[in-house]
Image (tube, grey):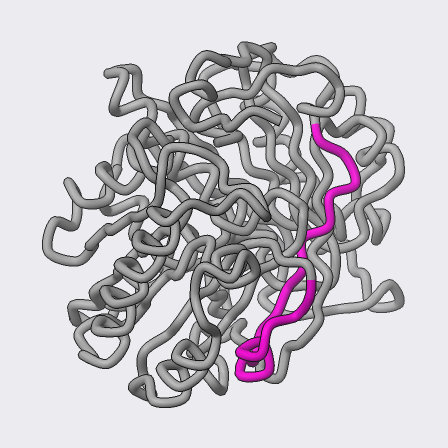
Amino acid sequence: MAEIGIVTARQFDRRRGQIHVYDGEGKGKSQAALGVVLRSIGLGIEKAAPSRVLLVRFLKGPGRTYAEDAAIAALQRGFPHLIDQLRTGRGEFFGPDEITKFDRQEARRGWDVAKGALASGFYSVVVLDELNPVLDLGLLPVEEVVSTLKQKPEAMEVIITGRGAPKAIIDLADLHSEMRSLRRTADPGNGELPASGIEIYTGNGKGKSTSALGRALQAIGRGISKDLSHRVLIMQWLKGGTGYTEDAAIRALRESYPDLVDHQRCGRDAIVWRGKQQEIDYVEAERGWELARAAIASGLYKTIILDELNPTVDLELLDVEPIVQALLRKPRDTEIIITGRCHAPLPYFELASVHSEMVSHKHYAEQGADLRRGVDY
């Protein structure tokens, strides 16, 4: 296979908006949705054609704090005219035997707003957060939801999250990624850091880097809520060259929060294939690690995203032992997010308190659809 970099990828531009479904027991579903939102906003700003976003959050009423609350607050503060949000439901968990009239009314209230948004064409992206469990609990008719989604405006992206996606929704989706929980020793639902402060997102499914972008937003928002400066470093491997759409998202973040977000990248503008590594690949990988190692040790950053570190180690461009030692010595209140696919678990996976594997069940690229900047790459 020929080497293909982002310059080649830029030639594709998918016009039809897709329906994304993120489900499963693992962490990262709502984060991935927010990462896609951030990418879309960044691309809209870059093109001087703002992308308006509606977040309808089912089963997340007042009375409980959720991890993504801080991320959404950061989005709304940074882009106040682009983000609309509606929360519905109880602020507590309940099972099928505990459903009340109020629960059905709240689900209907959220869906009525979503239906209006889907019909209007006013929004570029509509996120239906936790819609899957609403359908799984029977709070809304699946047939009505499917029928409405089939009639959405062609260019609109719809992102559906939550455990237990019904088959009819999966069949309708253009993309379906399942988040499988391989480790979760703490519940970060209260917005606090997990026990070790290390989270890992692996697998061949979509949602790894986008989840990491969601975590960057969360860190910034968490700092704002406490009147603190939570600095974020986004370090990317295997992503040389220019033109990645996360660049537009990161630039947009830095415009709103110029003193809080730093971004570094390393690598060639080409895919690195196993057995075809070049000397420059080793040099670039090591350069990136020296920057990351110094950042981890400094304590300057509250959140450090090591994007595509896993395949870098998997390709043997970096030794794993220095990484393990740096993670063991990191400041207690520094959160590390590591992303990327790999063939087998790496030694530092044992240090993580959260490990989600993104499993790809369906992707529109496999169905002949061109990639769309701001959403796919």
Classify the position of the N terminus by image quarter: top right
- What's the magenta region? 344-363
Of 328 and 20, the residue lying toward us: 328
Residue 44 seen in the current view? yes
Is 88 on the left or on the right of 357, as rendered?
A: left
Judged from this view, the residue extending furthest toward the left is 259
Residue 269: x %, y % from top left: 37, 33
Residue 16: x %, y % from top left: 59, 12
Q: What residue is drawn where x is 54% and y is 10%?
A: 15
Q: Quadrant of residue 270?
A: top left
Q: In this rendering, is residue 178 above or below 159? A: below
Q: What residue is drawn where x is 43% and y is 31%?
A: 53
Of 172 and 94, the residue lying toward us: 172
Residue 111: x %, y % from top left: 66, 35
Of 43 and 9, the residue lying toward us: 9
Q: In this rendering, is residue 93 above or below 84? A: below
Residue 123 seen in the current view? no
Q: Quadrant of residue 91?
A: bottom right
Q: What residue is drawn where x is 35% and y is 82%?
A: 326
Residue 24: x %, y % from top left: 74, 56
Q: In the image, is residue 359 part of the stretch drawn in magenta?
A: yes
Q: What residue is drawn where x is 29% and y is 30%?
A: 242
